[in-house]
Image: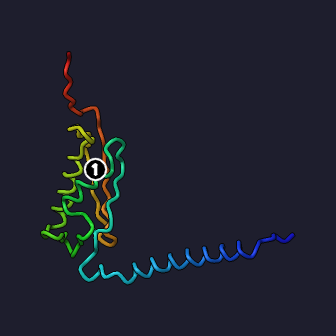
Amino acid sequence: MFIKVRRDTLIILMLAFILITSGRLMSYMSYASSNGTENGVAISGVIVKGNDIVPTESIKTNIANVGFRSGSYIQGDTLITSKRKVPLNEALENARQAAMLSTLPGTTVAPIKAVDVKLDKNTGILTVNVVEDFSTVQVNQTSG
């Protein structure tokens, strides 16, 4: 009950295994050798949860405009961007307000009524929990 495998198939499988393993190893090594700890913790990403209608990219763009974008980092209790230094609690409040201003694309409808923003100071990941409520949205209707 031996499985017959041709030699060229075996070589391709071995090369694929080596490439995948070396790729993982290189990504781990680049993360370990990154110099993000010299200046503080770099902002590594924004995770948006709870949105159904408002696009995630719209919310991420508004939050990036506040300062939570690549190139920014946290040093102590300060968010340092390429243009300014902001106290972290003020930056989180600005991010909350910016997420609430996110609208549906092409409209002025802003259905986001509550936002919870949390920042992990060890990893630099900003988590944004969004609550959308369409029952209170004011939509201008014209009768004709």
What's the residue at 59%, 78% (across, down)?
18
- Residue 96 percent coordinates (x, y): 22, 53
- Residue 75 percent coordinates (x, y): 21, 75
Count of numbered labels shown in the rendering: 1
What's the residue at 31%, 44% (across, down)?
54
Q: Nearer the viewer, residue 11 or 86?
A: 11
Instruction: Locate the C terminus and report the quarter of the image it occupies.
Output: top left
What's the residue at 26%, 83% (across, down)?
38
What's the residue at 20%, 38% (across, down)?
108
Q: Which of 18 and 135 is in front in this view?
A: 18
Residue lying at the far left in this picture: please name it.
84
Left or right: residue 83 compared with residue 107: left
- Residue 137 percent coordinates (x, y): 23, 33
- Label 1: which residue? 58
Left or right: residue 22 compared with residue 79: right
Amino acid at circle 1: Ser
Residue lying at the far right in this picture: please name it.
1
Left or right: residue 8 compared with residue 78: right
Instruction: Locate the N terminus and report the quarter of the image it occupies.
Output: bottom right
From this view, report whether residue 102 is shown above or below residue 1.
above
From this view, report whether residue 118 is shown above or below residue 97.
below
- SS of the residue under disc 1: helix
- Residue 116 percent coordinates (x, y): 28, 53
From this view, report whether residue 114 is shown above or below residue 12.
above
